Image (cartoon, helix red, strand yellow):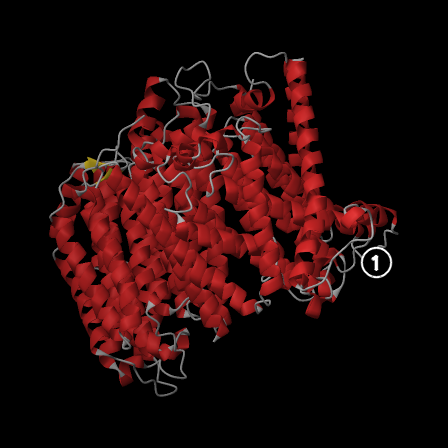
Amino acid sequence: MNTILETIIAPGSIDFALAIGIILVKIAVVIAIALLHVAYATYFERKVIAHMQVRLGPREVGPYGLFQPFADGIKLFFKEDIIPAKADKPLFYLSPVIFFIAALTSLAVLPFFDGFVIADLNIGLLFLLAMSSLGAYGIILSGWSSNSKFSFLGGLRAASQVISYEIAMGLSLVGVMIMAGSLNLSDIVRAQHAYPTGVFVIPQFLGFFVFVVAAFAETNRLPFDLPEAESELVAGYFTEYSGFRFALFFLGEYTGMLIMSSLLALCFLGGWTIPRFITDFIPFLSAVPGIVWFLMKVYAFMFFYYWVRATLPRYRYDQLMAIGWKLLIPLALINILITGLVKAWIKGLL
Amino acid sequence: MNIELKEIVFLCVAIMTILPCFIVAFSRNILHSAFALFFTFLGTAGLYFFLDADFLAVVQVIIYIGGVLVLLLFAILLTRNIEDIKTTNSLSIKHSVLAGIVSLIIIGGLLYSYISNRWVFPLRENPDYPYFTIKELGDLLLTKYLLPFEVVSILLLAVLIGSLVIANRSVR
Amino acid sequence: MPEFVMPDLAPVMPEIVMTILALVTLIADIIFKRKETLAILSIASVVLVFFVLFGTPFKTTFNGMFIADGYSLFFKLIFLLNVVLTVLISMRYLVIERVNFGEYYSLILFATLGMMLMASAGDLIVLYLGLELMALSTYILAGFITYDMKSNEAAMKYFLLGAFASAFLLYGISMIYGLTGTTDLNAISEYIILNGLTANPVVMLSMILFAVAFSFKIAAVPFHMWAPDAYEGAPTSVTAFMSVGPKAAGFAVLGRVFLIAFGSVRMDWSAVLIPIAILTMGVGNIVALSQTNIKRMLAYSSIAHAGYALLGIIAGTGEGLASVMNYLLIYAFMNIGAFAVIIMLRTEGFKGDTITDYEGLAKSHPLAAALMLVFMFSLTGIPPTAGFMGKLYIFMSAVYAGYTWLVVVAVIFSAISAYFYLRIVMYMYMREPKESVSLAATPALGIALAITAAAVIIIGVLPSAVVSFARAAVAGF
C-alpha cells in the first residue's frame, strides 16, 4: 500500500511482526542511550564550566559526583507540579511535550554508525530541519500559556530567533547537499568518505561557520540564549514551569544540543568515518568501531558549546537579528553560489 | 495484518487532520484556533506521506508549520487586546445555514465527480513510478518545469520588495 | 533521467529583457537620488522591450509552456503602453502624495512582466505564476500611500479578494489536472475531445471555477466587490494602471483558456459567461449613476466596460477576439486619459476627486475640460471617438455570432451610461466654478494627455489600422 512506510517498517522480506519488534527495540535503545547521554551532558557541562571557572563542580553524589544527574532527575520528578492560576491549561500542559517530542523525533533519522538508523529516510536532512521548526511551538506556546510577562517575552524572542536562524541553517546545509548529491544522512557520510579531504568542513568552511553559529541560536544557547536570559527574564519561556514539565524543557534543550552536534558531525566532520588519508597513514585506526569516532566528534562539539558558554557574553537582541539576517544568510547564499559553480565546473557544465 | 495496521495509522492521521479543524472554526480563543492549525498541517503532511509524496510532506512541515503558522501566531501575539474580541464566531443563524448548504453542495459535487470519473494518476503499476520523489522533482524542475521555476524566483523577489515597501514605510 | 537541454530563449527575449531592466531599475533606486530618473529609465526600458518584442520569432518554447504569437504580442503592446502612460502620469503625482519612492517603478515593471507571462502562457502553471506576479505587485502598488487609511483599505480588499480568486483558480487547475493529467492548454483540449469528456461534471466544475477566478481579475459582476473600493483608495496613477493592465491580462488568459483548453465546451462556458456579462453591464452602468466620487464612478465604468468586452469572448470567434483586443487597446487610451485629467486636478491640499470639483472647469481651464470631454465621449461610445469604434466592432462580432439580443441589451446599458459620463461634461461646461481649481500640469502629463487624446481621436476616425492589426494577430491563434 505504501512504499515509504514499507521501507521504514519492513526493509527487505523480514516478517512484518518481527520488523515492528526490531524497530521498537531500536527506538527504545536510541531513546535510552540518548537520554543517558543527555543526563551526562549536564554533568559534563557542570564539570567543564566549573573547571574553567576554577571550581570543582558537583562531587557529592557518588564518586566525583557521577550520580548527580540521577539525583537531579529524582528531585525534579518528585517536585510539585505548580500551574499558575491564570495559565491557559491545555496549552500549558501540551507545550513542554511538543518541545520534547520534536527533539526526540529528530533522533529517528540520525545514523549513529554505518547501518544503524531507525528510519533511513531519503530526505533525512529536511526532516531534521522540519523537526527543529516544530520545537519552536513548544517555546512560543509555553511563553503564551504561562500568562507571565517574562515567559511571553521569552517566547516571542525564541520564536523570532528560531525562524531567523533556521533559514541560515537550512541554507548552510545546501552546500553539503550539493556536494553529496543527497539528502540522506548516511549517503552524505559516505560521500564524505569518498571525497579526497574525507570531511566536508574543509571545502565547506563557510557553510560550517554559518552552521555552527546558527546551531547555537537554534538551541538557545549562550551567546544567543536571549529567550531565557536569566539576568532580564528570570528564566524566559519556562519561568512558570516546575517539576517534571521543567525537566522536559531541560531534556529537550540538551537533546537539541545533542542533535545539532550529531548533525554537525554527520554533515561536516564525516560522521562515523575518519578521512582515508589518516587510515592510510595509521592503518589500525580503521579497526576502531565507527560509533567511537562519531561520539568523539559529537562530544568535541558539545565541549565547544560549553566552552563558548563559559567564554562569551550574551548578545543584544538587535545584534542577534543583525548577525542572522545581515551576516549569516548572505554568507550562506555566497557559499551556495560558489559550491554550485564549482560543482558545475567539475562536471564540465560551465 | 499488514494492511490493517496501515489503515489504523491512516485513520489516526486523518482524524488528526480533521478534528482540529473544528477547533479552528469554533474555538472562541483565537490563539487556540491558530494552534489547532498546527495539528491540521501536521496531519496534512502525514497524508502526503501516504500519497508517496515524501518531499512534499517534509516541505509542508517546514513551510506551513515552520513559517506560515509561526508568523500567524506572531501576528496574534503582537496584536493588542486580542482577547477582548468576543465576536469572532458570532455567525447569525442565516449565515450558518447558508454556509452549511454551500459546504454540502461542494462536498456532494466533489464526491460525485470523484466517484463518476476515471482519474489519471501515475499508478504504482507503472514501472517508472517514483518511489522517492526528491530526485525526480529536482530533475523535472530543471528540465520540464524550468520556466515556472524561474518565474517563481522572480515572483518571490517581487514579493520581497513589496513587503519591504509596506513594512519599511509604515515605520517611518 | 531527463537531460538538461537549453531551451530556445529567443521567444522569451522580451520577458528576459524586462526582468533585467526591472532589476536595473531596482538597483538604480539606490544610486539615483532623483526619482524622475527612474521614471525615465523605466520608460526607456519599456521602449527597449518594445523593440525586442518586434524582433521576437513566433514560436513555442519551454516544452510548450511559453507561446510567442500574434495574440500575445498584441496584448504585450497594451501592457507596455499601459506602463508608459502610467509612468508619465505618476511622476508629479507621487511627489504630491509624498510617496516618491523608487520601488514604485520596479513594482510596475514586475507587474507588467507578470502580465506578459500571462499573455504568453501555454501552461496553467505559468499562467498562475504570471497572474500571481502581476497581482501581488499590484496589491502593493494599491497600498503604496501607506499613511493613508483609504489606500491601505484598497490594498487590503484587493489582496483578500484577489487571494480568494487565486484559490478558485488553483482549485480549477487542480481539478482539470486530476482529470487530464496535464496542465498544458493544448493537451487538455485534446484529452477532453479524445476521451469524450465534453459533458463531464469535473470539466464543467473546473470551467466554472476558471470563469469565477477570471471574473475576479476583470472585475465582472458578481465578483466585482473589490473594484470600487480598491479603485477609489489606491493612488490615482495606480488606479489607472490596474484598470487597464490586469484587466487586459485577465482577458488575455480568459481568451486563451476558454478558446483553447475549453474550446470543445464552448456552449457551456458561454452559458456561464452570458449572465455574467449582462449582470456586469447592468450593475456597472446602473450603480455608476449614483456615484459622487469620480474614481469610484470610473471603477463602475470599468466594470461595465469589462461587460462589453466579454461579449467578444462570448462570440467565440476570431473576429470576436480581435474586437476584444481592439477594444482593450482603445480602453487603455481613453481610460488612462481620463485618469490623467483627474490626476491633474490633484494638487497639494486639494483632492479633486469628487464630481462637483469639475463644476465650471471649462471656464477656468478650457483645454483640460476639452480633453475630459473627449475621453468622456469616448467612454460613452459617441462617434467619432475611438470608444465608439471599439464598441461597434465588438457588437458586430457578437451579432455575427448570433447574439443579437445580447447586443440589444448592451446597447441599452450603453445608453444608460451616457447619463453619468455626460453629467461630468455638463458640470464642466454648464455650471459656474465654485472655487478656483488649479492644475498640476507637467510636461510628462502633457505628453500622456497628448498621446491618449490623439489616439482616441485618430483611432476613432481611422479605426481600420488597429483592427486589421488585431485581426492579423488573432490569425495565428
In the displayed structure, A187 sits above or below B8; it is: below
Relative to B3, is C339 on the left or the right? Answer: left
Q: Indicate whether A161 appears above or below C276.
A: below
- Read off the chain for label 1: A
Q: Which residue is mark 1?
A: A84
In the displayed structure image, the side of residue A264 where residue C106 appears, left or right = left
Residue C340 at what x, y percent from top left?
Answer: 28, 70
Residue C272 appears at what percent x and percent y?
A: 42, 37
Q: Residue furthest bottom?
A: C436
Nearer to us in this view, A107 or C209? A107
Residue B4 appears in the rendering: yes
Nearest the viewer among C401 and C253 is C253
Residue drawn at point x = 18 percent, y = 55 percent? C49
Res C33 → quadrant: bottom left
Query: Could you say which is closer to the camera, residue A300 or residue B86?
Result: A300
Q: Position of residue C230 (x, y in %)?
A: 44, 61
Mark 1 nearby-residue class (10 Å; few <14, some 14–19, many ≥20): some
Q: Quadrant of the N terminus of chain C?
A: top left
Residue type at mark 1: give it.
Pro
Quadrant of the frame with the C terminus of chain C: top left
Q: Residue at x 35, y 72 (%)?
A: C101
Q: Position of residue A17 (x, y in %)?
A: 68, 15
